[in-house]
Every structure is written in structure tokens, then in C-alpha cells.
Amino acid sequence: MVRVVISLGGSIISDDPLNFDLIRTFVRKMESIDNLEKLGVVVGGGKLARAYIEKLRSFGVNEHILDEIGINATRMNALAVSSFFSDSNTKIPETINDAVELMKSYRFVVMGGTEPGHTTDTVSALFAERMGAKLLINGTSVDGVYTADPRKIGNAAKIPAMSYGDAIKLATQSSIGAGPSVFMDITSLNIARRSGIKVYVIDGRKTDEYREIIDGGKTSGTVIS
């Protein structure tokens, strides 16, 4: 029996308003995995967060307030996702400790962001560390880590496996003036490294792949360890 955390990117579930078919399929796949003892799911803000943040930023709204708005967007999305699980929390935790406490009562715990300055990547890594999970799956809109942003650079190559150190170096290079192209933030990768949490970066829309990773470590994405 394993404990796993999945970072469910807002970019893959956020539609108009949400991709409910994808969410329902994802939940059904997770509930069918017999060797999954506990699952933490951290949901991103996606279009809901961006719609508010981009417009309010143009009016000069304080960045700390924009962070708070983004966090509330992630929690709305998280509540929508949790409602599809048969054994999950109906109140979205606001801290990692609250989420871990809920693990005592539920097989599946869904949450969003926690505080300004912490991305959902970082929340996912902290959640995994705190609940003793050694596996973190980052479901994104790109099918792995590339040498450059494949949406912008045609000859960018996928990296099947990489060390924590190499991942941190690449994330550092990518984060300079290019936030959207960063596959994971540096803080989350450092947390994974210090606790030996294996990270899989995958196309989160391919719901079969979550099960393949949890059951046997098989992936067409990137493994960071």
C-alpha cells in the first residue's frame, strides 16, 4: 500500500468553468487503485485564477492580494474536485497540517493553495513530505520536462529522467522572465530532494498514466529522483 500526492494542474482541469469529464475520469481511476492507501490531491487555479489576477494586476492591485485571490481560486477548484470522490473531505483545508489531520478520516484529501508565495507545486511537495509519501505526480499540460518550452521551441527534447540537481538547474534557467514555462518551481524540487520524494512530470490529461505510475512506475513523462 502506498501514499501518493498528485499536483493536478489548473491548466488541465480549468475550462469554462471546469473540465468535469476529465475530473470524473481522474477520480474514478484513482478510486479503482487497490494498492493506494492514501492520496493527497492539490489543485491549481487555472483560468479561474488568471481571469481575476490578470485584470486586477492591470489596475495596479497589490501582488499579495493577487496571491490571495489565486489561492481562493485553487480552493474553489479543489472543492469541485473533492465533490466527485466518494471518500473525501467536503471542507477544503487551508494548511498542510489541516490536510494531514483529514487523512485520519479520509482515503482521499483534496486541497488548494495555502499562503501567498507558495505555489501549488510547493504545497504538493510539502504535503507529500508531511504525510510520508515518497511519490509525487505532477499532472501538467506538457508530457514531461523538456530542454526548453516545447510550445515555443520546435526542437526542444524531452528528458526521460533527471536528477534533482539537474531539475533545479533547469527550473532556475527557465524561471528567468518566463514563469509559465517552468515545469516545477525550485522550492518544490528542493523539498522533494531533501526528503527523497520521487517526482513524475506527466501530461495530466492522460488519466491511465497515474495508475501506471502508482502500480509500477511506468511513465512516458519525466522522472526526477
Image (cartoon, helix red, strand yellow):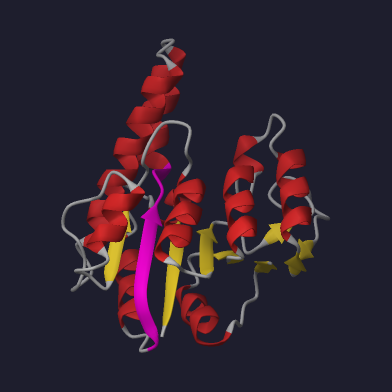
**Residues rendered magenta in the picture:** 35-46
| Front one among 99 and 89 | 99
Residue 37 part of the magenta segment = yes
Total numbered labels: 0
Residue 195 part of the magenta segment = no
Q: Position of residue 46 (x, y in %)?
A: 42, 44
* The residue positioned farthest toward the right in the image shown: 155
Q: Quadrant of residue 155?
A: bottom right
- Residue at image location 47% in from the left, 69% down from the top: 133
Q: Tell me if 162 is positioned left or right of 105 in this view.
A: right
Q: Quadrant of the N terminus?
A: bottom left
Q: Is residue 32 depicted above or below 71 in this figure?
A: below
Q: Tell me if 4 is positioned left or right of 52 in this view.
A: right
Q: Quadrant of residue 47?
A: top left
| Front one among 165 and 217 | 165
Q: Tell me if 54 is positioned left or right of 69 in this view.
A: right
Q: Position of residue 219 (x, y in %)?
A: 62, 77
Q: Main secondary structure of the magenta part?
A: strand
| Front one among 118 and 218 | 118
- Residue at image location 69% in from the left, 59% down from the top: 145
- Residue at image location 41% in from the left, 48% down from the top: 44
Q: Position of residue 83 (x, y in %)?
A: 19, 62
Q: Is residue 178 depicted above or below 113 in this figure?
A: above
Q: Is residue 82 depicted above or below 118 in this figure?
A: below
Q: Quadrant of the C terminus?
A: bottom right
Q: Is residue 149 visible?
A: no
